[in-house]
Amino acid sequence: MKQGSIISIALLTTLIALAGSAGKESERLPSVADDTYRKSCGVCHFAYQSGLLPSASWVKIIDEPNAHPGGALPLDEKTKAEVRSYLTRNSAEKSRSKISRKILDSIGSGSPVRISEIPYIKSKHREINQEIFVRKGIGSRANCIACHKSAGIGVYDDDDVVIPG
């Protein structure tokens, strides 16, 4: 076989692999890329990707008293502004992820504050017995990372789910 053929086969193999992963990439949510958000919110709960909610939801969670599902946010105004800015700059309507588009389609013009209450997310979990969510290793529907082992990198594929016993 000529050297040019070997290079062509290697290039073709690489292109096929890239094409196969390209569709998966759009299914991923971008990972959390902001240290202020990760350090401010991720100390109490999983730092959700900003593409899981529209900007109006993030603004409501940050700015409205008692809108945050876990109670009042213990953040100073400067930190709130930084977190709000990051979340709204990268919210669902600005994401190229298929998950974000499906979320937006399911909520219409709504601005939910609980990801677990989004119609698309609820439909993905409809066949899971309610008792599963209260298991010690899970705790609640809000603990995505308990079952979605790659949620931290924005992957919520059904194939990646491991339900704790």
Image (cartoon, grey):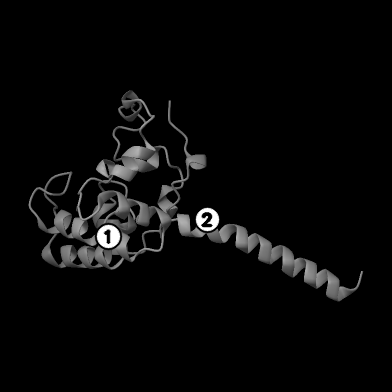
**For residue 88, what is the image quadrant?**
bottom left
- x, y percent for residue 82: 21, 67
Q: Where the C terminus falls, by quadrant?
A: top left
**Residue 130 or 83: which is nearer the viewer?**
130
Question: Is disc 2 surrounded by few (<14), some (14 to 19) or many (20+) residues within 10 Å?
Answer: few
What residue would you read off at disc 1?
A: 37
**Residue 109 or 140: which is nearer the viewer?**
109
**For residue 1, what is the image quadrant?**
bottom right
Q: Is residue 43 above or below residue 116?
A: below
What residue would you read off at disc 2?
A: 24
On the picture, is 141 further left or further right than 57?
right
Q: Are marks 2 and 1 in contact (CB under 8 Å)?
A: no
**Residue 41 or 154: which is nearer the viewer?**
154
- x, y percent for residue 129: 35, 25
Q: Residue furthest left?
A: 65
- x, y percent for residue 44: 25, 46
On the picture, is 60 further left or further right than 135?
left
Mark 2 and mark 1: Cα distance apart in space: 26 Å
Q: Residue at x 32, y 66 (%)?
A: 94
- x, y percent for residue 163: 44, 32
Q: Residue at x 53, y 58 (%)?
A: 23
On the picture, is 91 further left or further right than 71?
right
**Residue 77 or 6: which is nearer the viewer?**
6
Give the amino acid at mark 2. Answer: Lys
Is label 1 in a helix, a strand or a loop?
helix
Is label 2 in a helix, a strand or a loop?
helix
Give the amino acid at mark 1. Answer: Tyr
Q: Residue at x 28, y 41 (%)?
A: 116
Q: Is residue 47 visible?
A: no
Q: Earlier in the sequence, mark 2 or mark 1?
A: 2
